[in-house]
Image (cartoon, rainbow, N blue to C red):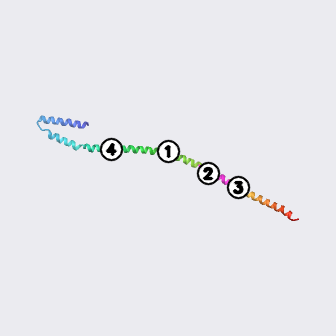
Amino acid sequence: MRPRSRATQLLAAAAAALALACGEDPVPNLEAERQALLDATQPKAAFWSEVERKGALVKEQRGLEKERASLATTSAALAAEQEQLVVASAQARDVEAQAAATLAHDRAELARIQAEVAKREAELAGFAALAVAPEAAP
């Protein structure tokens, strides 16, 4: 029992004893006090339904906290993975830039070599024409 209700009961008992000693009927006073106590308290059904409602809310809150913790862990793992992917992507861009520079250099070298080949083929064709021309002259 709560201390306040125990004190109230003792006070009521003392008042009843005093009333009996004075010759008064304590029943109306006690019933009035009982009614006042009943008016000041909740019915048991309402109290327990409130307890059950709050208990369900606490269980739901704990479940949500567990889910939030799980999501936070997953989020941290995904953030670390994303950071790794950003680093890998930057490295891939560097490699791609180096490959593009090498490819441009190689294409320029190929164009220079092809021009050199065309020049030499033209010289060879000129020499071949000269070689055929003296044989046709006599």
Q: CA distance from mark 2 to mark 3?
A: 20 Å
Rendered residue at 33%/44% (across/down):
54
| Circle 4 residues within 10 Å: few <14, some 14–19, many ≥20 | few
Q: Quadrant of the N terminus?
A: top left
Question: Label 1 amino acid?
Answer: Ala
Q: Secondary structure at mark 3?
A: helix
Q: Main secondary structure of the magenta part?
A: helix
Circle 4 residue: 54
Per the model, the C-alpha gap separating discs 1 and 2 is 28 Å
Which badge, 1 or 4, is on the more N-terminal residue?
4
| Of callouts 3 and 1, the N-terminal one | 1
Q: Extreme bottom residue here?
A: 137
Which mark identifies residue 116? none
Q: Which residues are magenta?
A: 92-105
How far is the residue under mark 2 from the one under mark 4?
Answer: 61 Å
Separation of disc 3 and disc 1 at Cα? 48 Å
First in residue order: circle 1 vs circle 2: 1
Corner quadrant of residue 60: top left
Q: Amino acid at mark 2?
A: Glu
Q: Is residue 134 magenta-colored?
A: no
Q: Which residue is mark 1?
A: 77
* Residue 37 location (% of width, % of height): 21, 41
Residue occupying the point 17% across, 35% down = 14
Are there few (<14), some (14-19), or many (20+) residues within 10 Å of tag 2? few
Q: Are marks 3 and 1 in contact (CB under 8 Å)?
A: no
Q: Nearer the viewer, residue 107 or 36?
A: 107
Q: Say which residue label 3 marks.
A: 110
Residue plotted at (64% across, 51% down): 99
The residue singled out by tag 2 in the image is 96
